[in-house]
Amino acid sequence: MTIAVLLKQVPDTTAKITVSGGRVDQSSVAKWSTSPYDEYALEYALQLKEAGAGDLVAITCGPDRAAKMLTDAAAVGVDSMLHVVADTTEMDSKQIQSILAAAIEHCGADVVLCGKQAADTNSGSTGPGIASMMGAACVGMVSEVMVEGDSFSALRASSSGNERVSVSRPCLFAFDKASTELRRPNVKGIMMAKRKVIETVSASDLGIDMGESQVIIESHDSPPEKPPGQKFEGADSVQTVVLKLREEANVI
Amino acid sequence: MPFDALDFYDVDSLLTEDERMVRDMVRDFVDKDVLPEIEHACRDGVFPDEWRVTLGEMGVLGAPLKGYGCPGLSYAAYGVICRELERGDSGLRSFASVQGSLAMYPIWDFGSEDQKNYYLPKMASGEWIGCFGLTEPDYGSNPGDMITKAEDMGDHYLLNGAKMWITNGSIAQLAVVWAKLDGVIRGFIVEKDDEGFSAPEMKGKHSLKASVTSELVFQDCKIPKDRILPGVKGLRGPFSCLNNARYGISWGAIGSAQACFDSAKEYSLSRIQFEHPIASYQLVQNKLSWMLREITKAQLLAYHLSQKKDSGDWIPEHISLAKMNNVDIALEIARVARDIHGANGILDEYPVMRHMANLESVKTYEGTHDIHNLILGRYITGIQAFTRETS
Ligand SMILES: Cc1cc2nc3c(=O)[nH]c(=O)nc-3n(C[C@H](O)[C@H](O)[C@H](O)COP(=O)(O)OP(=O)(O)OC[C@H]3O[C@@H](n4cnc5c(N)ncnc54)[C@H](O)[C@@H]3O)c2cc1C
């Protein structure tokens, strides 16, 4: 039995993003990292593996630089890694989902963990899209998952607070931020990762024809500059400040 | 926010991928576990035990040693570990230097097979802490004249004497102690509970406050015969340990300097005086660019030395130069950074005064700045100037 965790490499949340010619300038991104929600998926995938639920494969679809993320995942205990090398910048969600679904099938995985959305595109469609292609149960907004006999028990956000659900294979869990600590690698893991080989394939190696992208990105824009902060002085301004905090900032 | 370390010439790109992964791991530990706690640790004068546990879990103790449960990393990786730890605090790096280079290394290089199998795995995992007893109250730069002595009593050795300034002394399970047996310096492994051994802590330090410093006192201390290090006699024993520790310090000091530079840069950009950021004034820019210059040179020096260490093509004088230079510039950078912070520079809200005070110790231990000058002077001229005697 195989568990797959899907990892996406995104600009680090601290990296400065510049837009030029209507596109995010990827070459100016100083630091690339694993998308934060995916890190929670990875942590729980490692816990499932340790609980004996199966071998763990980390899968990514992206350019060459994304391999670094797979090596990092190997250092914390992922058994094998699959890298579908592709330039995803102009692909639509469906194309990426079909690549990842084929990659999951290629690895023989029937349990998939991923982030609820990527920190760069924030579309949130990858998990549910793949689940529907796989014919798998899809559980979103997950903050915890455990093995429970042949099935899995997951905790997810619901309108009433939290909901615990029990799911059988095939299934996909899309992770929200969880309260668990993320693990740090150790030297042994790093040395092991050095020896693990990343399987590298292209979309056509996986036998998929993605067709044309149905969604064309017309342009990227930088978010509007934040208006400068407002300054108030003296006790007389308290009422105005309270009003502004309530009416404009909606914080009280 | 992860630390954005100054690396003007991108020297870290010369590291291997796994060396950079080790760097990121230690950097993350320092960001998340060390920096939030360091000022408390300094105020209380303690080395937090959780750090010992995590260093063991990360598997960085005794970094360049191979076998017996040791990490088996390159000297470049060991250097990077020291640099990242010292970016947190010199006391933390001192802990790791003493454990790896001064306590594990002599057992690894000069110990018996039984000693290696027994001690090294639990020291690499951090379960046991080691310390290194060379300096005595009356013999610092001149350890060859040490008084501590061992006597062969037939079925055991008897140790008498005292060591001073011993890092990790009171928290260690074992001490590697250098003492004279029939007038020849030998290494002995002393365990915490050995009869006649005590390790009272030295209090009142204004420097390396998060590091434990102790005396080691031996009063008719009985040591089993199998605790002598069989593989070395004379000053070569302690000096080969010091070579490794000094090498690590030459990297470590860069970490302190990077932390001070970073703080000075941020502070000078946000501090407004005479209506403009102080970073906009030429005098301040001169200070910052001088820091950049010295840190970059120190990085290149340390990296090149790491390659020499890894290939085995090095002499102790190479290490003397690096230890001396890099600590010297780090201390001066800390002082200038403190100046740039103005009055704020003396507060524990900023790391600069702590690094500055720490580096005063680092300048003195592992061969004082001037002792390294003398080592280089002897190398250049062939004339030793340590003593007036002409031996
Ligand atoms: C925080 C801390 C931790 C330490 N940890 C350890 C440890 O774990 N184990 C251990 O064994 N030791 C340790 N030491 C001791 C350290 O190694 C010694 O302090 C160092 O060797 C210097 O010795 P000293 O302090 O006796 O100074 P001295 O040798 O008395 O030197 C005083 C001054 O005289 C100068 N000087 C000495 N001889 C000459 C000369 N011939 N020519 C010109 N100038 C000279 C020195 O450069 C220095 O400026 C530690 C020290 C400190 C501060």
Image (spheres, coloured by chain):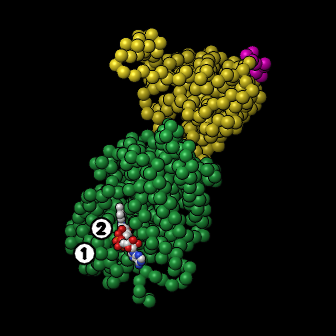
Chain colours: A yellow, B green
User: Seen in the image, is A11 located left or right of residue A45?
Assistant: right
Image point (44%, 76%), residue name: B236
Using the numbered discs, state the Cα–Cα distance from disc 2 to disc 1 in whole angstroms: 14 Å
Tell me if residue B375 is in the magenta stretch: no
The amino acid at mark 2 is Met
User: Seen in the image, is A171 located left or right of residue B43?
Assistant: right
Image point (36%, 56%), residue name: B208
Q: Is residue A70 above or below residue A169?
A: below
Q: Residue B162, how many percent across, how many down?
A: 26, 71
Q: Is residue B236 above or below residue B105?
A: below
Task: Count every numbered label the image shows and give the total.
Answer: 2
- Which quadrant holds the C terminus of chain B? bottom left
User: Seen in the image, is A141 located left or right of residue A209?
Assistant: left
Q: Quadrant of residue A239?
A: top left
Q: The residue marked by circle 2 belongs to what chain?
A: B
Main SS of residues in magenta: loop
Q: Do the residues at pointers 2 and 1 share their chain? A: yes
Residue closest to the eye, B134 or B288: B288
The amino acid at mark 1 is Asn
Q: Residue beneath label 1, please?
A: B160
Q: Residue beneath label 2, please?
A: B164
The kind of secondary structure element at disc 1 is: strand
Residue closest to the eye, B194 or B7: B7
Image point (43%, 33%), residue name: A181
Q: Is mark 2 within 8 Å of ligand 1?
A: yes
What range is drawn magenta here?
A: A209-216
Residue closest to the eye, B360 or A14: B360
Q: The residue marked by circle 1 belongs to what chain?
A: B
Image point (60%, 70%), residue name: B313
Q: Residue B16, how many percent across, how many down?
A: 62, 52
